[in-house]
Image: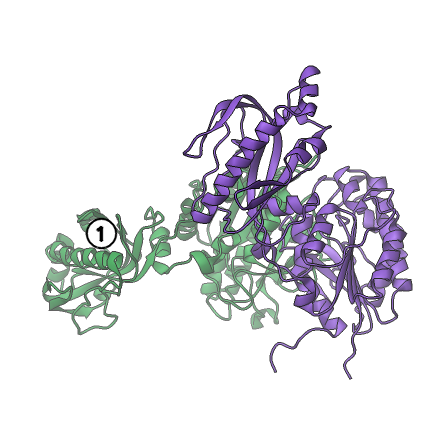
Chain colours: A purple, B green
Amino acid sequence: MSMQTKGVVLIADGMADRPVPALNGLTPLEVADSPHLDHIAASGQCGLMDPIGPGVRAGSDTSHLAILGYDPYKVYTGRGPFEALGIGLDVKGGDICFRCNFSTLEGTLRLLPDGHFDGATLVDRRAQRIAEGTHELAQAVDGMQIEDVTCLFKESVEHRGALLLRGPDLGANVSDVDPHHEGTVPHGAQGADPPSRKTARVLNQFVLRAWQILKDHPVNKAREAAGKRPANCIMPRGVGLAPHLEPFRERYGIPGACVVETGLIAGIGRYLAMDVPHVEGATGGADTDELALAKMVITMLEDHDFVLCNLKAPDLSGHDASVETKIGAVEKFDHLVGYVHEHGPADLHLAITCDHATPITFGDHTGDPVPLAICGPALLSDRVMGYDERSVVGGALGRIRGFDVMPIMTNLMGVQEKFGA
Amino acid sequence: MSMQTKGVVLIADGMADRPVPALNGLTPLEVADSPHLDHIAASGQCGLMDPIGPGVRAGSDTSHLAILGYDPYKVYTGRGPFEALGIGLDVKGGDICFRCNFSTLEGTLRLLPDGHFDGATLVDRRAQRIAEGTHELAQAVDGMQIEDVTCLFKESVEHRGALLLRGPDLGANVSDVDPHHEGTVPHGAQGADPPSRKTARVLNQFVLRAWQILKDHPVNKAREAAGKRPANCIMPRGVGLAPHLEPFRERYGIPGACVVETGLIAGIGRYLAMDVPHVEGATGGADTDELALAKMVITMLEDHDFVLCNLKAPDLSGHDASVETKIGAVEKFDHLVGYVHEHGPADLHLAITCDHATPITFGDHTGDPVPLAICGPALLSDRVMGYDERSVVGGALGRIRGFDVMPIMTNLMGVQEKFGA
């Protein structure tokens, strides 16, 4: 008698907004032409969602973790692992990850037997915000073996990068090597317990060897010849132990896919062992092909019961404080939603929401609640007729949290185990 | 790009109410003339707030802790520390505090080597509800040194007082000295672990020495001459370990002030290292100068980013079950809110709420939700047009908890760190 349906959550990154003076106090979502969003709202149930909790400013990473049903207060263990995921490192549970800078040292770096550095001074934490050549520098130190630990390193934008240590018996209670200010010798990492002391020992060795390799690297020789500071060392900070997360399929008993544009969210999807297809034409920018994303959602639904999709464009226009671009991004999301609704299964349960607000007047994420609408055959429609920050107030979903979305979806989809008898 | 604004939370103590038969089932807040409260509601967002949780009867202390963002289930460690705070003792994290009575003993009190008392009988736990002379009695025992522990004692109203023990290696797992009924010898305090055994030893010594001092005190000699029972001993009970709370400024990164009338809430403000100015004319009663409070809020906003203000009058009229006085107290709160709204910065984020309901028909705090309204430039207005227990239902804030107020305020004020990337 019980039936099983498929479920899709479509997330407009940062789409929710605050009153915009240039729009007479309305929001881009209120102003944009978005008939498909309104149709979902009118035919289903609406409410407000706090991605983490009321007022809490969510990152895209913590919000997506919560929406996928993983409590960020329990699993978000420092910036390092998610920074590493975001730039494409293949992070696994138990890895020790650091955010890093390419920096400039003067002098001859030495590692003393007590685990402190000596002989060199940090003169520029960002190596003059080096923009080119970091891929070559990263490759020169990536894959280093120290004791029984593999050191993976990858560059990010400008002077940034991430370091991953993988091996047995490593701990994450280690101090930063990066001294966080210039004119001083790098700090030797110190561990607070035996596994963390191993991490510190390997980390200090990595920093020393990286300096030995980078100081003579052709990229740096060329920089010095051009009168620029060399990016001759790597300064790790912000340690985090990559958490052991139950894969999506084990947690929910169904196969899931992530159709997304940004490295960070793709990384979270892979971390949960969800399928994360490459989408041709998905640029992550205002020029992205939103119908390519929509078509990939439909494709993924062929052999996945659950698909999460994120459109990045609204967030970018919020960060850039561009009203026109944000209205355009809302309309792109509307096209995406319309295509999925039209081409998905007739009994699909479809949720539309945002991972956080990125208001034009603020230019960054805020902790405001975001609108949520869900439609599908298992839902009693409420009185809400439009999808925007104001219209959804008073809908049947009330005010919920991101962490509530997966229980609600798996309940509607008929795939959730009963709790009790 | 991101902007920072100031924030104010104005709290009408116990203002929320239940249907009053004499008002045809309306509440004082529904009947009172309160145009400024309604204006805040109409221009901002409204909802219901459970100070602690749905249905939970809050004290003013637990509610204010929650509203300031300190989870009372974690930090409210017994009545002792907050009783001591409320009467003006300078409580610090780690202090051991007790509620106390001045009582009457007959006989000669002795402390046995095993930590039990002998030789005297408790004949009146409240020393005939002694009303005068307790300040002199308290001063006679205040500041006692026992081992390396300082004992601070201060009188409260009638026979009540509070004892604070400050010193190294004290524990709070100790039993009461007060036997809670008359006709018996006082109980020797017993500790459940080594630090608590030290507390018990010091506490028993304090009780013995206090009796030795008080039995011959002129106040008691005069009472006996007048045929009254002497307040010749102090009976501690309700132990609590004062929690180590992160100061407000460290938690939120902004300076905060408390403009309040009652010792208890002033004590909580000082405990969080907030500024707590003296307000001339703030009596804490129905005759209080509410505009003096409002003006102090505006003064405090000059060099504080956040100000909490509490008006006590509505609570008193609820305890006294006086409909007319309570309507008057609502109108006092309305004046206060109007002044702050008119004289505060144009971009102020202003919240108005209650710390709990004190319904006229109940005469004490209840666990009913209270109305909440917030206005300011970052908020999308909802459809609610009035501020009272019924009108706010269905507003954009939904139903939140006291603990959510600070995340919501710091989000609107633009001073909250992002959680994630």
Name which residue lies at 30% across and 54% down.
B96
**Image: B231 above or below B25:** above
- Can you give x and y, in whole percent of width and height, for residue A198 in the image? 47, 44
Q: Nearer the viewer, residue B327 or B261?
A: B261
Chain of the residue that carries numbered disc 1 in the rendered image: B
**Image: B6 above or below B98:** above
Circle 1 Cα neighbour tier, 10 Å, few/some/many (<14 / 14–19 / ≥20): many
Q: In the drawing, does residue B270 fall left or right of residue B406?
A: left
- Can you give x and y, in whole percent of width and height, for residue A200 in the image? 49, 40
Q: In the drawing, does residue A218 fall left or right of residue B82?
A: right
Name which residue lies at 51% across and 50% down.
B68
Q: Is residue A334 visible?
A: no
**Image: A222 above or below B289:** above
Q: Quadrant of the N terminus of chain B?
A: top right
Q: In the drawing, does residue A278 fall left or right of residue B137?
A: right
- Can you give x and y, in whole percent of width and height, for residue B326 in the image? 52, 60
Name which residue lies at 51% across and 29% down.
A186
Circle 1: element type: helix
Q: Quadrant of residue A122?
A: top right
Q: Nearer the viewer, residue A168 or B326?
A: A168
Q: Nearer the viewer, residue B177 or B352?
A: B177
Q: Amino acid at mark 1?
A: Ala
Find disc 1 in the rendering and name its residue. Answer: B138
